[in-house]
Image (cartoon, rainbow, N blue to C red):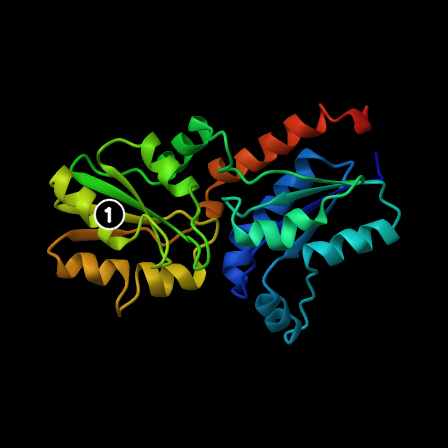
Amino acid sequence: MRDVAIVLASFGSADDKIRATTFDALEVELRKKFPAFEVRQAFTSNFMIRKLARRGILIDTPQDAVARLRRDGFRKIFVLPTHLTPGEEFDNKIKICAAVDVEIIPPLLSEPLDEKIFATILDCFPRGVDEDLILIGHGSPNRHNPVYERLQRLTGDRVHIGVIEATDTPNFADVVKRLKISRAEKILLAPLLFNGGVHVAADIAGDSDSWLTRLTALGYKVRVIRDGLGTFEKFRALYVARLEELLWTDANLK
């Protein structure tokens, strides 16, 4: 099975530490679990690819990674996205790679939503008995992603889903309404993102007009976790398990 490859496709990051503790860590775990397969990384962000290229770090787009693997003689390619939801980035940059020899693995938070996956997310961000938890995903500026609302229906009264993009929902105002109903006073704020990076530093926990500053201004006592989900081994294990299940049931590999 040396002619089978895995493309680990992520949005990307220019931060060396973030890449090491998320994408690179997952790549190592995939190589360890599937030693017979080639594993390569790809980024969907052209901005990140160009920024890293200026530093001599070369990373393909998913399409380029697939094309390169074909030239190298691989007959079966699995594309494993770390994008959590099937949104615009997944549709426009990853899903288009699908072909007879290329199988796209759905994002973890795809329909039907797996409650075990959400339970693992909650386990990554343990909150105090007197804290409400707010999980903040990316959202979309151009189209609504219903996954976030469906996630909200999986939660209890004291777990709230929000999105960064102000034009998408559940937005900041939606979450504040839920906080008032739950009579929250203390909040744990955490990213519903594979890697935190700029979104955590600016949009979630920044010094100006972030979720942290706005919630604090409303009188809430806020504690922030800045690490994305990809930094947690228990969360990365979900990708390994999903790929393992698919690989060993794939008819082309038997």
Classify 60 as above or below 182.
below
Q: Secondary structure at mark 1?
A: helix
Question: Pointer 1: what residue?
Answer: 175
Left or right: 75 in relation to 249: right
Q: Amino acid at mark 1?
A: Val
Q: Quadrant of the N terminus?
A: top right
Residue at 39%, 30% (x, y): give it. 119
Classify 48 as above or below 184.
below
Residue at 69%, 41% (x, y): give it. 31
The x and y percentages for residue 16 are 54, 63
Q: Residues within 10 Å of mark 1 (few under 14, many from 20)?
A: some
Comparing 157 with 92, the one in front is 92
Left or right: 177 in relation to 67: left
The x and y percentages for residue 143 are 45, 53
Residue at 28%, 63% (x, y): give it. 210
Q: Quadrant of the C terminus?
A: top right
